[in-house]
């Protein structure tokens, strides 16, 4: 697994040399843009509209636009010194909190931590301490030129860094338009909705969820590669015509109950088979 960062995690006087590895990967199917006439990949050039010519990499500088068309230019040396200043610091755990105190909206990206040379014992110590207390650590660290707020927790016996957004990066929920402040629900509708949720309740199993679009896209690509005839449906499935909210809830509940019935019979049959075997 590729190491993308090396550093030290510390809590109190305990220092843990670690390596960081990406815990997730983007599996989106990347499509290229081709020139329709000759099927050649299209290239994009950086052009200065003022000089009306292509600009080379060594002619480009970074700047912050603090007002319309007004910039503060920052040279590469200033930025590198600033990054190095922060990157050389050990990642210090500032607080220990409960995981359920952090709303999922704050979470951003996950990274695995492995012990670097000489760090196995202290790595195990932090892991055991987090496991026994049920706490997670809150820390700051530099990742890809950005200071990140992060949590350090356990995932399947491995320490994980989860980058989280700063509070000012999460937009105010009050700015979301047309959210009803309070709704009056008919008692029967609410009870039926709760029954539907109860019927659809299950233990979370990530393996049962698949990216149907990506699978279909790859099948289409493979079929085209092999030269097979490809047909795709463009007709959008039409939902059943339901008169009102109560009808929709009841119909959903009926379907959920119907979907679960075969499973119940199968379980019952399995229990009967077990009794026969026991005899």
Image: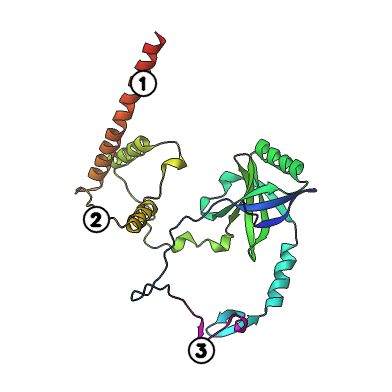
Identify which residue, 77 or 147, lies in the foreground: 77
* Secondary structure that dominates the magenta span: loop
Mark 2 packing: few (<14 Cα in 10 Å), some, or many (20+)? few
| Residue at the image position 39 percent from the left and 63 percent from the top | 177
Extent of the magenta region: 42-61
Choose top left, top right, bottom left or bottom right for residue 87.
bottom right
| Residue at the image position 72 percent from the left and 64 percent from the top | 86
The label on residue 216 is none
Q: Secondary structure at mark 2?
A: loop
Q: Which residue is mark 2?
A: 233
Please check the rendered image and state whether residue 200 is part of the magenta-colored stretch, yes or no. no
| Residue at the image position 32 percent from the left and 48 percent from the top | 184
Q: Say left or right for 184 vs 160.
A: left
Relative to 228, say whether 207 is above or below: above
Relative to 129, say whether 236 is above or below: below
Q: Which residue is mark 1?
A: 270
Identify which residue, 74 or 164, lies in the foreground: 74
Query: Can residue 12 be seen here?
Result: no
Which of labels 1 and 2 is toward the front? 2
Q: Position of residue 25 (x, y in %)?
A: 52, 54
Relative to 64, say whether 155 is above or below: above
Query: Can residue 131 be seen here?
Result: yes
Mark 1 packing: few (<14 Cα in 10 Å), some, or many (20+)? few
Asked if the residue at tag 2 contacts the one at tag 1, i.e. Cβ–Cβ closer than 8 Å, the answer is no
Quadrant location, the C terminus: top left
Choose top left, top right, bottom left or bottom right for residue 225.
bottom left
Q: Which residue is mark 3?
A: 53
Q: Position of residue 59 (x, y in %)?
A: 61, 84
Mark 3 packing: few (<14 Cα in 10 Å), some, or many (20+)? few
């Amino acid at each position: 697994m590729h190491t993308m960062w090396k550093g030290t995690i510390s809590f109190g006087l305990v220092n843990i040399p670690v390596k960081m590895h990406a815990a997730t990967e983007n599996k989106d199917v990347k499509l290229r843009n081709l020139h329709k006439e000759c099927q050649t990949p299209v290239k994009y050039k950086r052009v200065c509209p003022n000089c009306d010519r292509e600009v080379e990499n060594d002619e480009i500088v970074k700047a912050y636009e603090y007002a319309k068309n007004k910039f503060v230019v920052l040279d590469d040396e200033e930025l590198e010194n600033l990054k190095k200043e922060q990157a050389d610091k050990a990642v210090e755990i500032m607080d220990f909190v409960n995981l359920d105190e952090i709303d999922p909206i704050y979470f951003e990206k996950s990274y695995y931590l492995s012990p670097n040379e000489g760090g196995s014992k202290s790595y195990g110590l932090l892991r055991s301490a987090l496991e026994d207390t049920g706490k997670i650590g809150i820390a700051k660290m530099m990742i890809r030129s950005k200071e990140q707020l992060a949590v350090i927790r356990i995932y399947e016996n491995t320490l994980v860094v989860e980058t989280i957004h700063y509070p000012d990066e999460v937009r105010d929920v009050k700015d979301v338009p047309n959210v009803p402040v309070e709704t009056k629900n008919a008692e029967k509708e609410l009870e039926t909705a709760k029954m539907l949720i109860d019927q659809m309740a299950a233990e979370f199993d990530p393996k049962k969820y698949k990216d149907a679009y990506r699978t279909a896209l790859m099948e289409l690509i493979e079929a085209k590669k092999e030269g097979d005839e490809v047909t795709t449906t463009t007709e959008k499935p039409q939902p059943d015509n339901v008169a009102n909210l109560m009808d929709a809830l009841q119909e959903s509940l009926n379907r959920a109950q119907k979907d679960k019935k075969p499973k119940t019979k199968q379980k019952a049959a399995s229990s009967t088979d077990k009794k026969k075997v026991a005899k």
